[in-house]
Image (cartoon, rainbow, N blue to C red):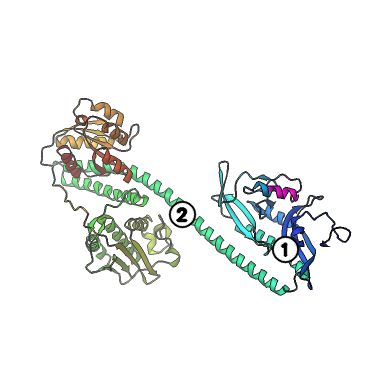
Amino acid sequence: MACTTYNGGHSLTSNNYAFRPYFQNAIIGNETIYPALGVTTGIRGLYVSAPIWEAESDKPVGVLVIKTMLNSITSLLKANNEQTALISPDGIVFAASNRDWLYRSCWHLPEERIAEIRQTKQFASQPLIPLSMDLSKDTAVDGIHQFNVVKIPVDILSADSRHWMIISISDTMKDYPVDILLAATAGIIGLSVLVILHIILSHHKVSLEQRVEERDRALLVTSEKLKHETHEREQAQEALIRAERMAAMGTLAGGVAHEFNNINTAILGFSDLLLLESNLNADDKECVARIRGAAKRAASVTHNLLTFSGVRKAEPKPSNLVLAVKDTVSLVKRDFEKDAIEIVEKLSPIPDTVMDAAQIGQVILNLLINARHALIESKNKNITIETFSDSNWVAVRVSDNGCGIAKENLELIFTPFFSTKGEHAKDGSAQSKIKGTGLGLSVSHTIIANHNGQFIVESEVGKGTSFTIRLPIISSSSCSTESPTPATRKLKHTGNILIVDDEDDTRDLLHVFLGRAGYQVSTASDGEEALAALGDNGIDLIIADLRMAGMTGMEMFRKISELPEDKKPALIAISGQVSQCERAELEKLGVSTIIIKPFELEPLLETVYCTINK
């Protein structure tokens, strides 16, 4: 459609389109792209308008309008499995995969703007009503459902300072429909090719080649930007899924470890009771010792699970990394020599730091065991362990000349339960004969992270692997170095003790052990029964589990804290896991000691004696 700027007999359109903003803008010299419904036909279209310039006067003398239908765009949007729409610069749905979205606003429009749209009959008699959800942000909520919102700007006409957009929503746990969005974007941008037609009649100072070149550059920039944003979204989504899986795994690990700690407490405790019997013969003691050893190994596994789940926190004290290395190497050196493995120690003096020596020793042990496994098929089997430091860090490096780690596995080695040993190894390889849980390196990584340290891995297949641990040098001047109290078995043990635990084995174990030591011991299976037993029985000490059916130990301690001072017994808490918040509350409630399951009986006896005789 083309016409002059005059209305009346000289115009092809007369007054029929003079009220349209795209017509008015073109008359004054502006390019415009405008979505509208045909007033008489009711058919949607994009009206691209441009002025026709008079070269001599440099003034617009007419108007060029190109109308393009949206059938192909609508079909493309409907091919998408997600809710997808073409949105006008005002935020109104002009084409969509869901017909119910048409002519609805995606966010709040000022009343003045709505009045203008109605006056110009942009959408004929269609009512302008908002969608049920606001799509102006990155997420939208419709009732109880939450959706991701992807917005892709589309520059259909460079002269228009505002953007058209493609908007797509999808369930929060589903991948973004990137391929469909790219196709839809390309299709809509393709409409802009029609605009080039007006260049033939546009200002004589602007050439066709320049406009095409500028448009190509703009499309290239838009395409690169879209690829970059898509990649970033994919990475963010992958990171979110990994974090959710890790959190779920941590919760599961913590629950499993708690149950196993109750079992190990009974096995270790009753084994200790048997070993204290003087009438056991040597063979029987050996059998009990083996049972106890197996339970200790099981306790080590639950210890790893608690560390991984984040329940067991580090207990930092002043220590030296060289001592941790020497202690660990001394445990395994003789055993490694049986496999003809030489451990070379290059231990340079380094500053002290604050660390949980037991946890750091566990990390070093895990690295040594992994190095041993890597050397199975090597002829010359060497492990080098060295310490060094700089102004900010102390470090230990464990290196081997074994099989190395494949490049594709380097990013996975700290993933919980990932393993290249046992059933996960190649059939017939030496690694297939090794049993592995896949927790060693993931637990080690968690421990070092909790120490604010760094893990550095370097490896080459066929040449070996090097693990470096770096820990920050932290002042240890404010840390306590109290030595443990001496054994108290020979001292006189008197007093009334109440054991509260819903685990029969733990309750019976403490009843027998403390009773043999000389204490008067009674028991209760939950907090309510324990409070009822307090009465006038003269209880000197309550030892209670924190997690019980019915009234928990924590709830019971809160009730006891409300008693008069002369009625309050001393309190000891036992549990398989205790959070930092629980520790703080227990201290406020007057709990003197927290004993972590599984525990050994002799240290428990010392704690009981000191608590009663404080």
Nearer to me, 139 or 285: 139
Q: Position of residue 266 (x, y in %)?
A: 27, 40
Mark 1 is surrounded, within 10 Å at the Cα level, by few (under 14), some (14 to 19) or many (20 or more) other residues, namely many
Asked if 581 appears above or below 55 in the picture, the reply is above
Task: Locate residue 548: give its quadrant.
Answer: top left
Q: Position of residue 285 (x, y in %)?
A: 19, 46
What residue sits 78% from the left and 72% below the top? 55
Task: Locate residue 369: give its quadrant.
Answer: bottom left
Q: Which residues are magenta?
A: 114-126
The residue pinned by badge 1 equals: 31
Q: Position of residue 54 (x, y in %)?
A: 79, 70
Q: Is residue 560 visible?
A: yes
Image quadrant in which the C terminus is located: top left
Label 2's element?
A: helix
The residue pinned by badge 2 equals: 242
User: If you read the primary sequence from the N terminus, does the residue marked by circle 2 or circle 1 appear first?
Assistant: 1
Viewed as shown, does residue 86 lie left or right of 150?
right
Viewed as shown, does residue 500 lie left or right of 611?
right
Q: What amino acid type is highlighted by mark number 2? A: Arg
Q: Position of residue 155 (x, y in %)?
A: 65, 62
Asked if 494 appears above or below 285 in the picture, the reply is above
Nearer to me, 601 or 393: 393
Q: Is residue 96 visible?
A: no
Q: What amino acid type is highlighted by mark number 1? A: Glu
Residue 122 is one of the magenta-drawn residues: yes
Tell me the distance, in whole angstroms, between the alpha carbons under discs 2 and 1.
Answer: 49 Å
Q: Nearer the viewer, mark 2 or mark 1?
A: 1
Mark 2 is surrounded, within 10 Å at the Cα level, by few (under 14), some (14 to 19) or many (20 or more) other residues, namely few
Viewed as shown, does residue 260 lie left or right of 242?
left
What residue sits 20% from the left and 26% below the top? 537
